[in-house]
Image: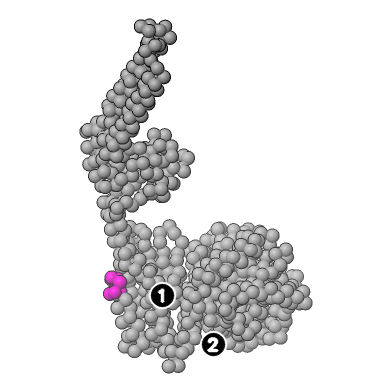
């Protein structure tokens, strides 16, 4: 086509030159009246001549236009004319398409690949043809690429913007290989049946409920192409490819709900905990990741699937059941003796709760301090009074004298000086690193113990030497009271009555005076243990009583109740006012006293840059699942989150979005389970 255009240009120049030359000669002859030409020509002659010239030029332009259009439509401008036939053959072999556009993205030329594949985009806006290509045109720096699909084939497209050249590379075969490899990528998992030992006695593995649960597991594995291998009576290893994993993901791991519904008729319902890992080529590493995911699933109360993708945040599915209380004093004694052994082998002990320390956290610290005193080990509770909840600080000051308090607590700055290689750091009522009283101690401590009753979050204190998280417990004070009573140490540990009173107050707080759904037989037994040590019910209650100002704040907060969903309320505090953490929690608890309220979310600003969300439920809604989506965590019926924002409109909008997308998932199955149990 290039040669044709050159010929047309030369021919056009010759025509124009001849017309100009003839016109000049005619003018010379006419104005000089040579050969008496003026008398020979009339006006009609001039008009006819001009008409002939106009018609001739119009016909010429029209003919050339049609010719060029025909050339373009037939893509007669071959790539071989530009880059040579050998290179064009290389482009055909590599399945590379070329397209040239003008500054308005109109296609001026394409090579043979488009014609051979019946893709006609001549004179078409390339962006309108494939909107995804707009990302290449909009980029200022660099030459990125994008993928498009045309006629079931995949192309990688690159733009040379200066030349207006679009390069299309057919990568359909590579995509097919990649997708196949991805579908066949290994996924490793571990499955464990929760509460198995409590249901099965001795070697009785033929329990009717257990048999049904195992049959469901085997059927599910067969349906989804999972290789299942038994590790222990209640645990299995799982191997499958990524394609099977995606099918399970689309099904949202229905085996969890199926097993729960089948086992609901038993006295102790069986549930499943599953840890899955993928996106890494080494199956040994995947097995380690799956094991960690399973640990998290079990520490969060079981009845859920935790998916760990390498380099990504863990994903949680299920978790609709409350953690089942397990009455196993032998296990408690073993755990208590392990803790005592660690304390005995340490030079000194530092005990630490969470920031904004409450009565449960402080009471648990006092319990561990008692164990250390019995073992004659130097110990101190790390406390920064500015990070202690108001009621706890008041109880601390009113219960202990100045000298006694100095022997009991130490601030975080001085605690760093006490830390050495043989110092044991015991973390209570918290397991998230940035929520402890003094995060710097975590970085320097060589030996760390974690004891908590909250559902385990993905963010966790690294490599503790002793780890006990029991989401079935109502409070950490409950756990420590059990350790004190059931340890093997002789003579037995004696808990001072003042310590026992504060620990009882901690149980009152976290169990909502035994009204929480987390309250179980163990909670009452722990309260009995503390009463035997001289705990004062009345004083423990006084520690938690509201003063007039706090009661007024709670009343003002709940006056702003809104009901975005049936049975769910949201209360927003004053955006210009700072609240104590306990006040926000108290407001959430108060909301549950209203008839028809099943879950409550209370929002209040606790610092110039932070806002707290406290969530409470009567057990029909798993607020922990909802709050986790807001960046927090907690229990089935009690959870909280800290937001680094004070924009109440944005926070409220976020909560409403979570409710809209996840409320149905978070709804507990207690009513349905109760009906099935009664059937």
Quarter of the rendering occupied by the N terminus? top left
The Cα–Cα distance between marks 2 and 1, rounded to whole angstroms, is: 24 Å
Q: Nearer the viewer, residue 169 or 179?
A: 169
Mark 1 crowdedness (10 Å alpha carbons): few <14, some 14-19, many ≥20: many
Q: Check residue 521 in the rendering and tell me which mark sits there, or answer none.
A: 2
Is residue 356 among what the camera can see? yes
Q: Residue furthest right?
A: 548
Q: Answer above or below: position of 367 versus 25.
A: below
Q: Check residue 273 in the rendering and tell me which mark sits there, or answer none.
A: 1
Q: Answer above or below: position of 86 versus 375.
A: above
Q: Check residue 233 in the rendering and tell me which mark sits there, or answer none.
A: none
Q: Residue at x 26, y 43 (%)?
A: 115
Q: Residue furthest bottom?
A: 679
Q: Position of residue 515 (x, y in %)?
A: 60, 85
Say whether marks 2 and 1 touch (CB < 8 Å): no
Q: For this view, does 248 lie left or right of residue 655?
A: left
Q: Nearer the viewer, residue 643 or 439?
A: 643
Q: Position of residue 313 (x, y in %)?
A: 46, 61
Q: Secondary structure at mark 2?
A: helix
Mark 2 crowdedness (10 Å alpha carbons): few <14, some 14-19, many ≥20: few
495 in the magenta segment: no
């Amino acid at each position: 086509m290039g040669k044709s255009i050159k010929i047309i240009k030369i021919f056009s120049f010759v025509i124009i030159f001849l017309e100009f030359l003839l016109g000049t000669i005619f003018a010379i002859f006419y104005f000089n009246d040579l050969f008496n030409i003026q008398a020979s020509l009339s006006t009609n002659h001039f008009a006819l001549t001009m008409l002939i010239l106009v018609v001739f030029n119009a016909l010429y332009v029209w003919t050339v236009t049609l010719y060029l259009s025909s050339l373009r439509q037939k893509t007669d401008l071959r790539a071989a004319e530009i880059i040579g036939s050998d290179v064009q053959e290389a482009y055909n072999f590599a399945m590379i398409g070329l397209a040239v556009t003008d500054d308005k993205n109109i296609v001026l030329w394409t090579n043979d690949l488009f014609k051979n594949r019946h893709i006609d985009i001549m004179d078409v806006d390339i962006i309108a043809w494939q909107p995804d290509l707009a990302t290449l045109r909009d980029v200022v720096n660099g030459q990125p690429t994008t993928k498009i699909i045309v006629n079931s084939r995949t192309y990688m497209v690159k733009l040379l913007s200066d030349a207006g050249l679009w390069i299309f590379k057919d990568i359909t075969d590579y995509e097919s290989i990649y997708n196949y490899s991805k579908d066949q990528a290994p996924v490793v998992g571990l499955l464990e049946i929760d509460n198995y030992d409590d249901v099965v006695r001795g070697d009785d593995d033929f329990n009717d409920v257990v048999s049904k649960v195992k049959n469901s597991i085997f059927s599910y594995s067969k349906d989804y192409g999972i290789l299942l291998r038994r590790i222990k009576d209640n645990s299995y290893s799982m191997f499958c490819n990524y394609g099977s994993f995606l099918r399970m993901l689309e099904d949202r791991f229905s085996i969890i709900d199926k097993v729960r519904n089948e086992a609901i008729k038993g006295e102790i319902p069986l549930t499943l905990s599953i840890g899955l890992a993928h996106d890494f080529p080494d199956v040994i590493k995947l097995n380690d990741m799956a094991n960690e995911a399973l640990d998290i699933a079990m520490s969060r109360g079981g009845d859920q699937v935790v998916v760990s993708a390498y380099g990504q945040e863990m994903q949680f599915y299920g978790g609709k059941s409350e953690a089942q209380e397990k009455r196993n004093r032998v296990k408690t004694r073993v755990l208590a003796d392990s803790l005592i052994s660690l304390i005995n082998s340490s030079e000194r002990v530092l005990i630490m709760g969470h920031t904004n320390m409450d009565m449960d956290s402080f009471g648990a610290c006092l319990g561990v301090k008692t164990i250390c005193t019995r073992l004659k080990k130097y110990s101190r509770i790390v406390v920064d009074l500015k990070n202690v909840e108001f009621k706890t600080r008041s109880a601390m000051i009113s219960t202990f004298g100045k000298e006694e308090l100095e022997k009991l607590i130490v601030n975080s700055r001085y605690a760093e000086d006490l830390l050495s290689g043989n110092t044991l750091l015991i973390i209570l009522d918290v397991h998230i690193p940035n929520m402890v009283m003094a995060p710097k101690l975590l970085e320097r401590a060589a030996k760390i113990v974690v004891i908590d009753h909250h559902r385990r979050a993905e963010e966790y204190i690294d490599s503790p030497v002793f780890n006990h998280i029991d989401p079935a417990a109502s409070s950490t004070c409950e756990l420590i009271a059990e350790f004190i009573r059931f340890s093997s140490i002789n003579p037995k540990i004696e808990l001072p009555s003042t310590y026992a009173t504060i620990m009882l107050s901690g149980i009152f707080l976290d169990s909502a005076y035994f009204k929480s759904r987390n309250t179980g037989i163990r909670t009452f037994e722990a309260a009995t243990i503390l009463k035997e040590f001289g705990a004062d019910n009345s004083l423990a209650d006084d520690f938690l009583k509201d003063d007039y100002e706090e009661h007024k704040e709670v009343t003002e907060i709940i006056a702003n109740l809104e009901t975005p969903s049936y049975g769910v309320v949201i209360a927003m505090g004053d955006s210009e006012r700072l609240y104590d953490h306990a006040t926000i929690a108290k407001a959430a608890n108060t909301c549950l006293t209203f008839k028809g309220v099943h879950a409550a979310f209370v929002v209040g600003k606790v610092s110039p840059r932070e806002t707290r969300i406290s969530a409470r439920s009567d057990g029909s809604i798993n607020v922990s699942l909802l709050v986790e989506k807001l960046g927090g965590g907690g229990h089935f019926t009690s959870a909280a989150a800290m937001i680094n924002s004070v924009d109440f409109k944005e926070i409220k909008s976020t909560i409403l979005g979570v409710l809209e997308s996840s409320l149905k998932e978070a709804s507990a199955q207690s009513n349905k389970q109760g009906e099935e149990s009664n059937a």
